[in-house]
Amino acid sequence: MTTPAIEIAGLRKTYGAKNAVDGIDLEVHRGEVFALLGPNGAGKSTTVEILGGFRKRTAGEVTVLGLDPAHPTRHWRERLGVMLQSTSGSTVLTPREALHHAARLYPNPRDIDETLATVGLTEKANEKPRLLSGGQRRRLEVALAVMGNPELVFLDEPTTGFDPEARRQFWTLIESLRDQGTTILLTTHYLDEADRLADRIGIIANGTMVALDTPEGLRARATDAWVSWNEDGTLRREPTPTPTAFLRDLLSRHDGEIPRLQVTHPSLEDVYLELIGAAQADADAAKEVTA
Ligand SMILES: Nc1ncnc2c1ncn2[C@@H]1O[C@H](COP(=O)(O)OP(=O)(O)OP(=O)(O)O)[C@@H](O)[C@H]1O
């Protein structure tokens, strides 16, 4: 059995009195696409920065590709691709020049033209950086992160600011990297993105992991379906764990067509919001106890 790409046990990071990361345990398997979700300030970026060797942890054990990121080596860095949330980017290099420069840092770089095309920057390859839009700069950062054909890629909110077409291109890129066996850890606020790309999802709130499951497993946590229909000109909506029985009963009480009859199942977003809401309520209750 191969060792996991990432192993984290009891990870903590404090900033003064603030527990930004408050005891996270996680294993990310080789070849897995793992998505970290969580509200603003949950601790996602801090975790990614520690894993990438850009930030020191306060406590805990961390191994990334067999090495402690607090003591990085050049060879280890060559095997990683990293896109942080707050990279400033070059102010002088065009996209082609930036990729050319990055390619020289790696033993086995990707093809520059193919990478520019993959992120939809072919037309902007020779553009001055100040003339690139925010979304185009982010696309360039994605390209830079994958330029070295990394074994493991960290992408912190990679598609923020992308137009819908750029997001689709990004999804195709992630799927092709996964097909090549690349391990990917990404953070996102887009539930549809996590649902589409991730093998597993970790949901972080207040620095702790409140759920860790496959997208399907998370969705299955919601037991109730919703039945909605129009009755006497009013839209009715009821939750039910047994929608078939509910419908049978509803049909027996109505003759003919029931206007706007619909059965829906909770989305990943519904489950996410419920988990985050519960975590926040727990945190508020804990605060009251200590106050
Ligand atoms: N350099 C720092 N100094 C002090 N506090 C910090 C620092 N960086 C982050 N924090 C705090 O740590 C917590 C976690 O921040 P982090 O950036 O990891 O969250 P996040 O989940 O990535 O949020 P977002 O979705 O907004 O990017 C926040 O409360 C934040 O204010």
Image: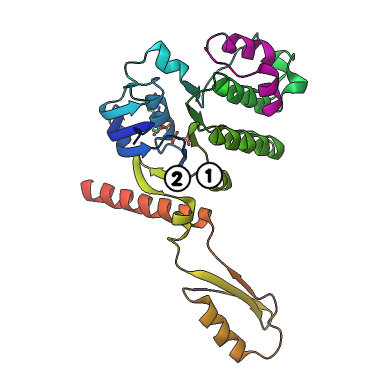
- Give, as a single range, the part of the protein colored magenta: 95-118
| x 37%, y 13%: residue | 73
* 176 sits to left or right of 39: right
Q: Is residue 159 visible?
A: no
Amino acid carrying label 1: it is: Ala
**Label 2 neighbour load within 10 Å: few <14, some 14-19, many 20+:** many
Q: Is residue 106 above or below residue 249?
A: above
| Dot 2: element | strand
- Residue that protrudes farthest toward the left in the picture: 290
Residue at disc 1, CB closer than 8 Å to ligand 1: no
Q: Are marks 1 and 2 in contact (CB under 8 Å)?
A: yes
Identify which residue is drawn at 56% across, 85% down.
248
Residue 2 image-quadrant placement? top left
The amino acid beneath tag 2 is Ile
Q: Looking at the picture, how far across and down is residue 61, in whole percent? A: 26, 29
The dominant secondary structure in magenta is helix
Q: In this rendering, would 48 be left or right of 111?
A: left
Sequence-wise first label, 1 or 2: 1
Measuring 49% from the left and 36% from the top, which residue is drawn there?
A: 187
Residue 99: within the magenta?
yes
Residue with the mark numbered 2: 201
Dividing the image into four equal quarters, which quarter contains ligand 1? Answer: top left
Q: Quadrant of residue 117?
A: top right
Q: Does residue 143 appear anywhere in the picture?
A: yes
Q: Is residue 168 magenta?
A: no
Mark 1 — residue? 194
